[in-house]
Amino acid sequence: MSSDLRPHVLDTRVKRGAELSTDHHLVGGLQLPSPGEFQPDPEGGWDIESEWTMFSTSIVDAAIRSCGRKVSGAGRGSNPRTQWWTLEVRDAVKLKKESYRAWLAWGTPEAAEAYRQAK
């Protein structure tokens, strides 16, 4: 690397095995951000609270879309009221847990196979 670029680069790595059809190896680097990259917006400024609110709401919304929402106060053994937790899922989980306990208690190959099937 040339000496004039060294102050602007954080790290470099040689990628051996990258096919370049020469005797040289591919080099990748991580460049420092430019000094003006993280400056606040001149009109409104930069507010950490609004950034955090936007970040947290997007994470929570994505989690709700993929996993559903659990109703607060749903106790142990009751229905957590998510979209994916159905009676069929509950029965399958119950069978898996019973098969696991039987496998631990007996330790036989048949119990292990029953647990694998239930899982």
Image: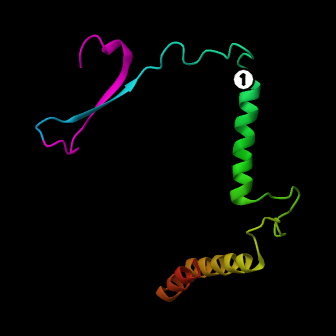
Q: Which residues are magenta?
A: 1-21
Q: Quadrant of the C terminus?
A: bottom right
Q: Say above or below: 29 vs 33.
A: below
Going by the picture, which residue comes out furthest to the left?
A: 23
Q: How is the image coloured?
A: rainbow
- Residue 11: image quadrant is top left
Residue at image position (69%, 50%) is 62
Residue at image position (56%, 81%) is 115
In the image: residue 113, left or right of residue 23: right
Q: Helix, strand or loop at disc 1?
A: helix
Q: Residues within 10 Å of mark 1 (few under 14, many from 20)?
A: few
- Residue 23: image quadrant is top left
Q: Say above or below: 54 vs 106.
A: above
Residue 93 x %, y %? 68, 75
Going by the picture, which residue comes out furthest to the front?
A: 43
Residue at image position (29%, 10%) is 4
**Nearer to us in this view, 23 or 69:** 23
Residue 26 x %, y %? 23, 36
Going by the picture, which residue comes out furthest to the right?
A: 73
Magenta residue check for 93: no
In the image: residue 82, left or right of residue 16: right
**Residue receiving disc 1:** 48
